[in-house]
Amino acid sequence: MWRRLLKLLKQALARLGPRLRKRVLAALAAQQVPGPARALVRGLLDPEQRDFWFWWMAVTFGVALLVGLLIAVALAPVSALVALAALGIWAVARKVGTRTQPSAT
């Protein structure tokens, strides 16, 4: 059944012009995306629909990505130092723990 529907959809889209086909595919894809991200999907798939909301969402996602990368770069050395300190404490505790236990000979 799905193959038949897919075949019918392909035939219907083949009859449409390339411009209208892009709009139909953009509308179908945008229905699957929740909320304001629909404007971004429509703009990515159909350049003629790049309006204010598309650019607003694109800039917002770009700034969020940039801030996330900056935070990751800033926190990576700190988390590495914390992990190094924890490893050092664990190694010292393990070495001290083996000295205090009596040998089983």
Image (cartoon, grey):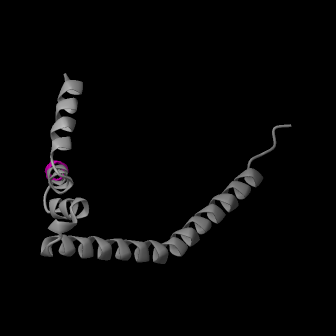
Left or right: where does residue 97 sit relative to residue 33?
A: right
Could you say which quadrant of the image residue 69 lies in? bottom left
* Furthest residue toward right: 105
Q: Quadrant of the C terminus?
A: top right
Residue 81 vertical placement versus 103 (above, below): below
- The percent position of residue 7, horizontal first and vertical second, equals 22, 30
Query: What residue is shown at x 51% (from left), y 71% (from top)?
Result: 76
Question: Bounds of the magenta span?
Answer: 27-32
Could you say which quadrant of the image residue 68 lies in? bottom left
Residue 97 vertical placement versus 80 (above, below): above
Viewer-proximal residue among 85 and 49 = 49
Query: What residue is shown at x 14% (from left), y 52% (from top)?
Result: 27
Is residue 30 highlighted in magenta? yes
Question: Main structural element of the magenta stretch: helix, strand or loop?
Answer: helix
Is residue 85 highlighted in magenta? no
Residue 33 vertical placement versus 10 (above, below): below
Query: What residue is shown at x 16% (from left), y 43% (from top)?
Result: 15
Query: What residue is shown at x 57% (from left), y 65% (from top)?
Result: 83
Left or right: where does residue 89 sit relative to residue 26?
A: right
- The percent position of residue 71, horizontal first and vertical second, equals 41, 75
